[in-house]
Amino acid sequence: MARWRVNPCHCREGGCGARVSHIIIIDNDPSAALVTQRGLQHILGSDALVERIPSAGAAWLACARGGIDLVIIDPGGADRSGMALIKALRHEHPGLIVLVLTAYDTPRLRKQMHALGVRGYLAKPVELHELGTLVQQVVAS
Amino acid sequence: MAKPRRTTAPALVQRRHHRLAQALARIAQLERAAAPADVPPPSVTRRLNAILAVCAALLVTQDIEMILQIVVREADALFPGSSGPLLFLADERDERLWLRATRDGVVPPLSMDPGQSLAGRAYVAPRAMLLGAEQIVDALGTLTDEQSEQFASIVAPWPPRAAFLAPLRVEGQRLGALVLPGAAAEAHFAPHDLPFIQSLTDLAAVAITARRQLVRAAALQHDLAQSRSLHEQAQARLDAAQAQLLQSAKLAAVGELAASVAHEINNPLYAARNSLYLVEQDLPESAPQRVFLGIAQSELGRIARIITRMRDFYRPDRDELETTDVNDLLDETVELVRTHLRHGQVAVVRALDPAVAPITAHADQLRQVFLNVMLNACDAMPGGGVLTVTTHPAADQSSGGGVLIAIADTGTGIASEHLPHLFEPFYTTKPQGTGLGLAISAHIITQHGGGITVASELGVGTTFRIALPASAPRGHRA
């Protein structure tokens, strides 16, 4: 449980007082999730804490505890839990920023996500630096 | 008193002159009627020769009216005691007998039912017969006053004192009747004449039947030719529809497969591509592995581009359709490729008919189609040329309208051997092409219930024609 608690500082020394963005990644594909997490952590450095969350349910709990700045999620695939999480977050945490990174891009999904108020939408196989740029813009805003 | 006498005398004279003329006319008529009595009947040999002549004439005659005239003329010649033969033909629908030919060619609109009067009796009779004065009076009793007047106007004397009646029959089928009223003396019409008159009517019946059969055969042949032509046209339409259906089914199948493969490949491709990126970040600038990492990344990037195109086979749902102005969409697309066009020194001619009504469609997908076709056109004009974009309302208003679009270039053209394969997935003539652009375009247009065709001539140019309905038919998802 402590893994997902908000860390106010992610520098080597810790406790420096700088605000660290806490980003969580929910993706059914473990390889894709790992690459996203490592890549973003590499790009964002100590300005962010990027974590993988194993399921939509666990992500919902993490968000309920607070301290999450950005949720990156793939709502596609056979498992509809990602979509359910986005809808739940919209109702329960309307201020929480959600970014969609999906392998199941369709015009319909794009339209649905737009209607649900997601801040950004990227289709795989996007390059990491493009994802990093978008995340930096979203976090900065 | 003298005055009235002076005025009535000329009138009296005139009336008497008139009566005198009438009396003279009557005398002349009676003399004419009596005249045949002095003419001896033709010999048997002469009659047989006449029958043979009729036979020869009927064999070569193709016109029914002419046949009737020949029969009447020859009957008149064979039986000089007649006051003029009357030939009746039965209406093929209701069997009512209509007078069709007389000696002097005057044919009043005289008709009667089978069994009625002389012609009616002749029609139902099994063979030729001779009627005497009493039988004639009995037969004429069934005539109306109007019919009697019509007979009296063409037969003199009326009523006749004798008459030959003969049916026109072929193999039990009744066609009409010949009536030969006797002019003066009953004695000139004898029963031994009956075979001659029957022979004459039999010949006439055969000739008429042959002619009618020829006419029916010609009509049937015409109908058959017309049916064959219609059948060929229907077959051609069916073949075209089947080919289109097959193409549509192939595209749909490829589309389903491509979209699902694309979705499944995206995750591993994303992971592989970006893993290489992460590895590259930790390598020193001079590391020799960077060359191969670059190649791997480049090739994965190529795969990514193909996958992105394959994803375009995705079929949108109905709720993604919107009212779309095709003219606006084409304008926007031309603007999108304008830089490309300028570099290629390509002039654009737009002839967009403002009468084109908006259609229900997936605007982004149609834009993709137009873009694809226009970029292909630009590629086909490396030395510059003219790109012409035209629209018209669809002529078939029964389907609620629609639009016809033509995108034409003056480029190099496409070789005829490539044309049948142009819309097949992965078929390309370009070294760097994926072979998906036109296949996706055709798929999108098909999903909208429309059609896309191409016509091309080497060295002249290529024209893509796209037909889109006002709204996609039910059963289509787009």
Image (tube, coloured by chain):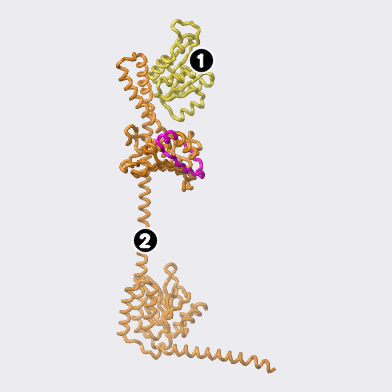
> Looking at the rendering, which quadrant does residue B303 occupy?
top left
Q: In this figure, which residue is indicated by the disc labeled 2?
A: B222
Disc 1: host chain = A
Q: In this figure, which residue is indicated by the disc labeled 1?
A: A64
| Residue A9 seen in render | yes
- The residue at the far bottom in this view is B2
Q: Which residues are magenta?
A: B338-361
Q: B1 left or right of A91?
A: right
Mark 2 burial class by Cα count in 10 Å: few <14, some 14-19, many 20+? few
Of helix, strand and loop, which one carries label 2? Answer: helix
* Chain A painted colour: yellow
Residue B291 position, x and y percent, is: 31, 19
- The residue at the far right in this view is B1
Disc 2: host chain = B
Front residue of B182/B390: it is B390
Residue A52 sits inside the magenta stretch: no
Front residue of B474/B236: it is B236
Do the residues at discs 1 and 2 belong to one chain? no
Amino acid at dot 1:
Ala
Figure check: A129 above or below B67:
above
